């Protein structure tokens, strides 16, 4: 499988047109800020369709991330490499969601995380410069950007609280209830890393709940 240490052959993207993705993209933004027809057209033109193969990297730890993406289909994994060289899963990103290495995006500094495709994935991507130009043309996009940033902060706080206040059993049950598609479709080692346990511990948790 391609890894963060091998990005040159890991990334395999192709531009293509996906009408369904365009509709979902503007519909998602329109739920946050009401858009006119002309504004929807401008937004559609600003986001470029990108196709990623399973295992490929979209963001690499140590580089500056200057893009935001909307996930049309597929799944992504946000992870970092710790001091011992281990991959630590931070988040899973599902369809109909916006994603970026936001700290890097906002500060123009190298990111501490990587984002890769767990399966064949289709994104709609916009660069920071294009997004800023779009925001100048459509001021209400500033509101959309603020809400996206706030949602990311809330997600990060929830993950920290989960790791600090819940037992491994509680964390697993919560994920099983709220995100069963992750349990069913994401490799065991990635789910275990996200929950802060070893794959062996996660296997035991699964067996206990099946009894």
Image: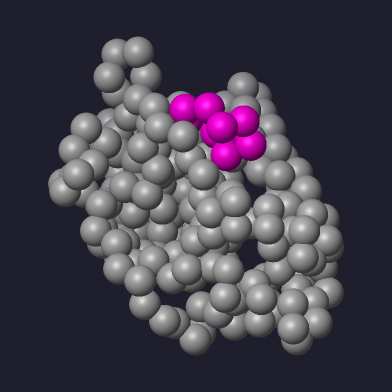
Give the image's coloring scheme: one colour
110 in the magenta segment: yes
Where does residue 33 sit, x and y in percent of width and height? Answer: 82, 68
| Nearer-the-camera pick, 121 or 158 | 121
Where does residue 58 sit, x and y in percent of width and height? Answer: 37, 49
Where does residue 163 sit, x and y in percent of width and height? Answer: 57, 27
Q: Can residue 15 be seen in this view?
A: yes
Name the quadrant containing residue 6.
top left
Tell me: 55 left or right of 45. Answer: left
Name the quadrant containing residue 26.
bottom right
Say above or below: 208 vs 133: above
| Nearer-the-camera pick, 210 or 65 | 65
Q: Image point 28% across, 31% down: which residue?
A: 200
| Nearer-the-camera pick, 72 or 206 | 72
Q: Image point 57% across, 39% down: which residue?
A: 105
66 in the magenta segment: no
Say above or below: 141 vs 100: below
Name the quadrant containing residue 122.
bottom left
Q: Image point 62% across, 22% down: which residue?
A: 164
Q: How many labels does the image show?
A: 0
| Segment colored magenta | 103-111
Where does residue 144 sit, x and y in percent of width and height? Answer: 76, 58
Q: Image point 74% across, 77% down: which residue?
A: 39
Q: Is residue 211 visible?
A: no
């Amino acid at each position: 499988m391609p890894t963060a240490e091998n990005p040159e052959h890991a990334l395999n993207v192709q531009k293509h047109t996906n009408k369904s993705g365009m509709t979902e993209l503007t519909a998602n933004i329109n739920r946050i800020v009401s858009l006119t027809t002309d504004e929807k057209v401008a937004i559609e033109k600003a986001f470029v369709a990108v196709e990623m193969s399973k295992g490929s990297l979209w963001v690499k730890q140590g580089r500056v991330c200057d893009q935001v993406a909307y996930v049309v289909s597929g799944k992504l994994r946000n992870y970092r490499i710790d001091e011992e060289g281990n991959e630590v899963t931070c988040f899973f990103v599902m369809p109909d969601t916006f994603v970026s290495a936001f700290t890097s995006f906002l500060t123009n500094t190298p990111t501490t995380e990587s984002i890769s495709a767990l399966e064949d994935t289709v994104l709609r991507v916009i660069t920071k410069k294009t997004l800023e130009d779009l925001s100048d043309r459509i001021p209400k996009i500033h509101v959309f950007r603020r809400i996206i940033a706030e949602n990311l902060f809330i997600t990060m706080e929830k993950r920290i609280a989960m790791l600090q206040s819940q037992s491994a059993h509680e964390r697993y049950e919560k994920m099983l209830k709220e995100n069963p598609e992750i349990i069913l479709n994401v490799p065991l080692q990635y789910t275990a890393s996200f929950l802060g346990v070893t794959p062996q511990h996660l296997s035991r948790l699964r067996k206990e709940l099946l009894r």
